[in-house]
Image (cartoon, rainbow, N blue to C red):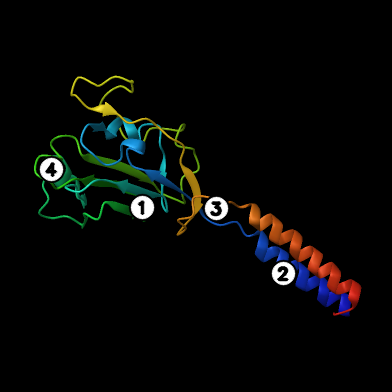
């Protein structure tokens, strides 16, 4: 009877340890260029698949904002009806609903100058494709090249994104600790059986 209880405890602990976190992708908007004038965000979004739970990290200098707006305000670069607005210099937006989300900078002339981003979020869980592959979620506004486009904006370079458990900000996180916790659970259960605690 005691070995049955020990085995049951080990299986329960092992089961809890093997539950994988809901992985989300944290996208740094504009990559190394950040949220600034002179970046082609249409090119930046090409090849990225956004899912529910993914995060957009906007990094920007003073004088800029991140405003989430509706489709009409996005097209008109209007800021009067912003859904959310932030000017802290570091804004992280969690994509919680499917559909297209629109972001602009509300500083005078910045949206008209190209500081606008639209991302289409697929229904279902977080994105499962890396940022360097997959289908396009928006139509690029200019070809991806290393030279400025005809509009004078420079396409952002793509850097790797990090898969994180939803709600986490630790870029070094990994699912490997789950493996080690499972091994530890098996060892503790085996040791408990060997010394007769159960």
Name the residue: 44% across, 36% down: 131
Residue of label 3 = 173
Contact (CB < 8 A) between labels 3 and 2?
Answer: no
Q: Which numbered circle lies on residue 6?
A: none
Q: Position of residue 182 (x, y in %)?
A: 72, 60
Mark 3 or mark 2, which has the lower sequence index?
2
In whole angstroms, how far apart are the C-alphas of marks 3 and 1? Answer: 20 Å
In whole angstroms, how far apart are the C-alphas of marks 4 and 3? Answer: 38 Å
Name the residue: 12% across, 43% down: 77
Report helix, strand or loop for mark 3: loop
Q: Position of residue 9 (x, y in %)?
A: 76, 73
Describe residue 174's horizontal placement relative to residue 113 as left or right.
right
Residue of label 2 = 12
Q: Quadrant of residue 21?
A: bottom right
Q: Position of residue 196 (x, y in %)?
A: 89, 78
> What is the quadrant of the C terminus in the image?
bottom right
Report helix, strand or loop for mark 4: loop
Q: Which numbered circle lies on residue 95?
A: 1
In whole angstroms, how far apart are the C-alphas of marks 2 and 1? Answer: 33 Å
Q: Position of residue 48 (x, y in %)?
A: 40, 36
């Amino acid at each position: 009877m005691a070995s049955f209880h020990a085995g049951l405890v080990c299986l329960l602990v092992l089961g809890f340890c093997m539950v994988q976190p809901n992985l989300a992708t944290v996208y740094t908007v504009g990559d190394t260029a950040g949220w600034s004038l002179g970046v082609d965000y249409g090119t930046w979004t090409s090849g990225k698949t956004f899912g529910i739970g993914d995060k957009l990290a906007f990094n920007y200098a003073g004088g800029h904002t991140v405003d989430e707006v509706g489709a009409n305000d996005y097209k008109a670069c209007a800021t009067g009806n912003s859904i959310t607005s932030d000017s802290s210099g570091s804004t992280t937006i969690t994509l919680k609903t499917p559909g297209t989300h629109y972001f602009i900078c509300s500083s005078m002339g910045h949206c008209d100058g190209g500081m606008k981003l639209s991302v289409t979020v697929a229904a279902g869980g977080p994105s499962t494709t890396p940022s360097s592959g997959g289908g396009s979620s928006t139509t690029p506004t200019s070809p991806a090249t290393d030279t400025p486009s005809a509009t004078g904006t420079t396409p952002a370079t793509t850097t790797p994104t990090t898969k994180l458990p939803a709600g986490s900000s630790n870029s070094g996180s990994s699912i490997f600790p789950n493996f080690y916790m499972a091994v530890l659970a098996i060892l503790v259960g085996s040791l408990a059986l060997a010394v007769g605690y159960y």
